[in-house]
Amino acid sequence: MASFKLDVVTAEKVVYSEDVDMVIAPGALGELGILPHHTPLMTTLLPGELRIKKGENELILAISGGFLEVRPTRVIVLADAAERAEEIDVTRAEAARKRAQERLAQHAPAVDEEVARAALARAAARLKVAEKIKRRKRLV
Ligand code: ATP
């Protein structure tokens, strides 16, 4: 099967760099599935799941938004933050979600709702990925 090189990087580190069969990303305009030989493109990403398929395996990363670029022979994801399921601190993400929800519930002028909504989306993405992987492990 044809494959392509996928690099997932943040400002801090290279999170993933391998040949893969497919990547499914949370594009700003909807979920984006990238197969080999996809037309070159550049798009922004929302907080969510980055699903990486390689043979029988699927790796899911929680990403906090960023950019995705499809080049002729490789795909680059420049993420604001990216974590593998096992790296996610669920207690921290739950606390971040609660904090953001409380801020949004205040409807106070001092609350930057956009910032709170973005924090909520990052926390929700982390919790979703952590929960999905936990469920998968229970099934094995
Ligand atoms: P918090 O409010 O808990 O700091 P945040 O959404 O503001 O969360 P980010 O700014 O997105 O955090 O990320 C800062 C760094 O912390 C990144 O390296 C990111 O991977 C890491 N990080 C954030 N939340 C978690 C978490 N729940 N588990 C593991 N790593 C996390």
Image (cartoon, helix red, strand yellow):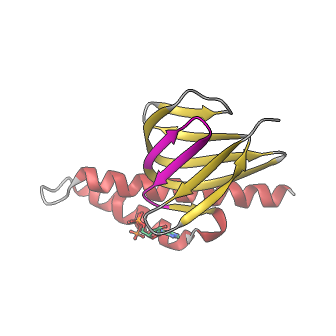
Please state the horizontal and vertical placement of residue 31, each as a whole percent of the image. 54, 34
Give the vertical position of 6 relative to 80 (above or below).
above
Please state the horizontal and vertical placement of residue 106, each as a whole percent of the image. 23, 57
Q: Nearer the viewer, residue 50 or 93?
A: 50
Q: Residue at x 47, y 52 (%)?
A: 78
Screen quadrant of the N terminus:
top right
Relative placement, left or right, of 10 versus 61 is left
Please state the horizontal and vertical placement of residue 67, each as a whole percent of the image. 44, 45
Relative placement, left or right, of 111 versus 29 is left
Q: How many marks?
A: 0
- Ligand 1: give its quadrant: bottom left
Q: Residue furthest left?
A: 109
Give the vertical position of 70 relative to 64 (above or below).
above
Q: Is residue 132 magenta?
A: no
Please state the horizontal and vertical placement of residue 47, each as a whole percent of the image. 46, 49
Q: Nearer the viewer, residue 6 or 91?
A: 6
Q: Residue at x 33, y 51 (%)?
A: 117
Screen quadrant of the C terminus:
bottom right
Q: Nearer the viewer, residue 139 or 48?
A: 48
Q: Main secondary structure of the magenta part?
A: strand
Q: Residue furthest right?
A: 140
- Asked whether residue 98 is in view, the answer is yes
Magenta highlight range = 66-81
- Asked whether residue 128 is in view, the answer is no
Q: Residue furthest top?
A: 39
Q: Residue at x 53, y 73 (%)?
A: 91
Q: Residue at x 58, y 63 (%)?
A: 15
Relative placement, left or right, of 83 versus 136 is left
